[in-house]
Structure formats: structure tokens, C-alpha cells
Amino acid sequence: MLRVRAGVPKEREEAFNVLVTKYRTPVVHFLYRMVREPALAEELAQEVFLRVYRARKSYKPRAKFSTWLFRIATNVALNALRDGRMRRARESSLEGETEDAGPAMQVADPGGNVEQRMLEAERQEQIRGAVEALPEKQRLAVLLHKYQEMDYNEIADILDCSESALKSLLFRAYETLRVRLRPLLGARI
Amino acid sequence: MSEHLREEDFIQYLDGRLNEAARAELDRHLAACADCRGRVDELRGVMGVLGEWQAAGPSPRFDAALRARLAEEPASAPPWFAWRPAYAAGLAAAAVLVLGVYLWPPTAPDVPAPVTQFPPPPVTPGVPPVVATPRTPAGPGTDELAAFDNPVLLENYELLEQFDVLFEPVPPKEKKSL
């Protein structure tokens, strides 16, 4: 279990740096899939780590660190969705106001020619749209299960439900996705 | 196994989280049940398709931006529970002071005025002093209520209480000869 050590400040700082290095990519990935806006996802990820930093003295390792971290990330994401930050970020992005915000976030180059890339982008958009259309809790369950590969007990802890309820939640989510994404099954470009 | 797979069976089966015996039992059912087999195949396919969704990772400026935000954090902000007892103690002291002044006899006792050795707390501009303030003809409870607004008194409560200064009788006001 990775812990934020409550030792001298320098040790705490080093431990915090290790945590940021280890978890910044999965946290940003998770938040990007929640809010869809790269700049907002990055800002929220920083907020997550700031909250971890602020709570470094009071943190009690009752659960895995990653469970605690993604519980914070979940709360931060839901807050952003509810207070309209995602909508504002999207509008701002559409207006091109974020062009000066610095280098873009890192996305793997899909390669291929222009047509292939367009088809790939369309496919990704369908997947994203199908996941985004899920009810909030189902979406969170899928993101934590499929993309963060967390154990059932961790996800259940984050979503504050029983493992049995989580499995049912996941089944319903994947069933919905099975119907929505059926056209993509077996149609790999 | 003749019954169809339950909801949680599908997920655990696809995740490979079933023990050997349970998995073998489900395999036997799937071999005989086209409905469940078709569903499992499609769910497996969906999970594969979901894996194609790429997410943006942190930009190269992520660490620098985080460091900048961390630098703005207070060095050692006390947690809420650290200041609460002191604040509560300060309020309690103020309440004791107010009650004491209210319950004090309205006429001055016929004893010499006590001498307080502890220097009075610094006076905050605009805030009336509380500890050594004699009651005014306007009646008790006027200036005493200012104790709640007196940060010097509240912040120094723990120090002041060691010298009993808070519990010293209020010096009686000299009687004017009629």
C-alpha cells in the first residue's frame, strides 16, 4: 500500500511527488473521460492533487491510496459537471479562447491516412457518446472498471454501494452499451 | 447448470474473476445455451470496442502548473479541528466574563480594589477594552458584549487564564460625592 508518509516535511514532499508521478496520467485519463475537455480535465486533476496535498496530514490509510484518490477525483468531476464548468469549458473551447492555454494534452497519433483518421475519430465519437449517455453512476462504474481496471471492492467503495449492487450496475451499463455499440462490433476499420 | 447466467455472472466471467469450478460450470451452460453464449460474445466485443477510446493524458506543462498551484498553498494551514478548541475556549471565556459581570453586585463591595499585576492586553483600535472595563452607568451588558468581538481577548485566552486575570473582580468605580 502506497502511503503519504506523515514524517518530516521533506519526506512528505518526496512521497507526494511520487504519488503525482504515479497517478497523474490515470487521473487525467479518468477526468478527461468524465468531462471531455482536455484543459478542464487537467485543471481538475491538479485540483485532485491539491486536495490530496491539503489532506496529507489527516490522511489515514484505511483503504488503498488509489481508492481514496479516485474517490476525490470522482467528487471533483461530479462537482465540475454540476456547477457547469464543463459546459463553460466546452463553449470556451469552441470559441477558441483556449488556444493560448499552452501545449495540448498528449493523445496518441492514430496514424494512417486522412480517411482512416476520420473514420477512427468517428468511431471514437460513437464510443464516447455511448458512454456519456449512460446514467452518471453507471458511467463512473464503467470508467473505473474498464479503464482504471479497479477491483470490485474498490469501485464499490468509491461509489458507495455494495459489490453485488456494483456488479448489477456494471451489467446494466454494459448491456446498454452492447445495444448502442452493436454497429461497431465486428466492424473494425 | 441449466439456469441462465445471472447478471453478476456475466461480469465476473468476462473479467476472469471466477474460481475454476464456477467457471467450468458456466462454460458447460454456455456450450448448451446459445442465448447466453451470444450475449457473452457481444459483451466481450463491447468491452473490446470500449478499449479503443483513447483519452488525453497530461500535457507537458502539467507538473509546472501543479507546482505553481502548490506554491500558492499556505505553508501550514491548520486543519479546522486545530483551531476549533481554541476558538471554543475563547468563546467560553467571553461567556464567563459576561455572566460574571451580570451577576456581580450592582453596588461596589466595601473592600479595597484588587491590584492586577498582569498587564492589560493591547488595545485594538476601534475595539473597546473588556477585561478591565468598569461598568458604566448605562448598565451592565453594554461593553461586556464586546468581549465576543475582542480578538485580543479571545486569542490570548489560554495565556490570560493562567493569571486569573479574567476572573479578577472588576474594580469598582469611584463613587462620586453628591
Image (cartoon, coloured by chain):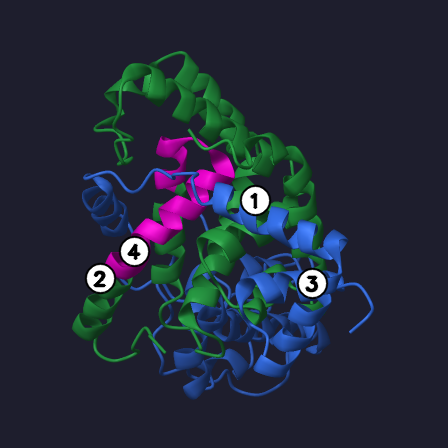
Residue A118 drawn in magenta:
no
Closest to the camera, between mark 2 and mark 1, is 1
Q: Which mark is residue B30?
A: 3
- Chain for colour blue: B
Q: Is residue A40 magenta?
A: yes
Magenta segment range?
A20-43
In this picture, residue A6 sits left or right of residue B10: left
Task: Give the residue displayed 56% in from the left and 44% down from the top.
Answer: B46
What residue is shown with label 1? B46
Badges 2 and 1, same chain: no
Residue B150, how many percent across, how many down? Answer: 49, 59
Estimate how packed mark 1 is, as few (under 14), some (14 to 19) or many (20 or more) residues with alpha carbons within 10 Å.
many
Residue lying at 65% horizontally and 72% vertically, measured from the top left: B101
The Cα–Cα distance between marks 2 and 3, rounded to whole angstroms, is: 48 Å
Position of residue B24 measured from the top left corner of the image (x, y, whole percent): 63, 76
| Main SS class of the magenta portion in the image | helix
Residue drawn at the location 49% of the way across and 36% of the way down: A35
* Badge 1 vs badge 3, beta-carbon distance below 8 Å: no
- SS state under label 2: helix
Q: Earlier in the sequence, mark 1 or mark 4?
A: 1
Dot label at residue A17: 2
Instruction: Give the Cα separation between the discs numbered 2 and 1.
Output: 37 Å
Task: Tell me the green chain.
Answer: A
- Name the residue tied to disc 4: B74
